[in-house]
Image (cartoon, rainbow, N blue to C red):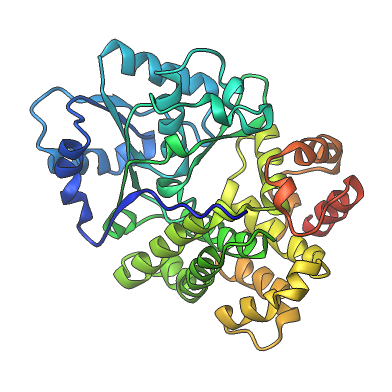
Amino acid sequence: MALINYLTQIHFAHGALSVLPDECARLDIRRPLIVTDPGVRQAGLVDRLLAAMNHPAEPVIFDQTPANPTEQAIRTAANRFTAHKCDGIIALGGGSSIDLGKGVSIAATHSGPLRTFALIEQGMNKINRSVSPLIAIPTTAGTGSEVGRAAVIILEDGRKVGLISPHIIPKAAICDPELTIGLPAGLTAGSGMDAIAHCIETFLSPAFNPPADGIALDGLRRGWAFIERATFSPQDRDARLNMMSASLQGALAFQKGLGCVHSLSHSLGGIDPRLHHGTLNALFLPAVIEFNMAAPSVTRENCLPRLAEAMRIADPAKVPDAIREMNGKIGLPKGLGEVGVTRGSFPQVIDRALLDHCHKTNPRVATSDDYREILEASM
């Protein structure tokens, strides 16, 4: 049986940040913890948020979100939440800040180590409705975490896992493309390919969800058409709007499930947290598509021709090569070797990928040998 569920209240427009006071009032958030990272604060976006709130109270801010959110950082932020008697969370930033905010919403209201709530530890049903309300405000266009039911974090034992529950879906998402204007080219490219990877991989997932398929294909069409403009023309408002839409749509769709791209990027990102998640997705995507071409569901549903149509590529078999070419055009690395990955890490990467929650929703079951071949092809 398919479960098709869309829950977040989304405000999407240039200048949408102005609705923040109304959303705080709707959710009865009077003393929020603002979760962000040093770069977002340095860019002046926290000041813009505070100006939009016109909040008389002294703000409570946690601005030390790491590039990949960790259990330790979540505990530190949750302690601040509790110490200041906060009643809600505003996550301002990329997927890391939003995922950390989701982690805080759990840690501040549930007891036990965060591994208790990981999907691979059968923890989904241990997260209940007592979580703190969360407003998500993305400042990048990539993860779509502002509408997702997952927080991907690194546990104290080093595993990168998903905390997944409908209860941690943000109560409101404020998608204001103006907050992404001026985003550096490298971050625009990596996060943009993250959105494109979401749209493609969830579309290829064999689960039955026609609305998600439609959302994913339209998101791919937008992302593919505008990622170069957004990367090289950082002030282009239309490009920024379409990339933010692609990011949002990829996340709305990936309730279908993802696949081997994310199994590998979660695994490798847990081993080396310095690696950018979206960039890893971009590097794995071509080889995984080639691996999935023979999957019965991909053939039956004419998935490759439908992807090619959205990307305006004449030959469906050329989709993987087109992605490799796009990675080069927007300045991303040519392979894993360029970001410091060595073959010595392959056994650990493969072991963790096989246990990742995305492994099971790939359209073709991947073995250890399959993962090794994908890693080799992505080097």
Residue nearest the viewer, comparing 221 with 38: 221
Seen at 68% across and 46% down, the residue is: 358
Can residue 186 be spotted in the picture? Answer: no
Task: State whether residue 329 is above or below residue 96.
Answer: below
Seen at 62% across and 76% down, the residue is: 307
Question: Based on the displayed image, in which of its 4 quarters is residue 40 positioned?
Answer: top left
Image quarter (top left, top right, bottom left or bottom right) of the N terminus: bottom right
Residue 338, percent from left and from top:
71, 52
Residue furthest out toward the bottom: 314
Residue nearest the viewer, comparing 19 with 70: 19
Seen at 22% across and 35% down, the residue is: 27
Task: State whether residue 377 is above or below residue 300.
Answer: above
Residue nearest the viewer, comparing 8 with 32: 8
Q: Is residue 336 left or right of residue 43?
A: right
Residue furthest out toward the right: 369
Q: Is residue 236 left or right of residue 192?
A: left
Residue 58, percent from left and from top:
15, 22
Residue nearest the viewer, comparing 67 with 161: 161
Residue 114, percent from left and from top:
56, 21
Q: Is residue 232 left or right of residue 27?
A: right
Can residue 361 be spotted in the picture? Answer: yes
Residue 287, percent from left and from top:
77, 62
Task: State whether residue 194 is above or below residue 62.
Answer: below
Image quarter (top left, top right, bottom left or bottom right) of the C terminus: bottom right
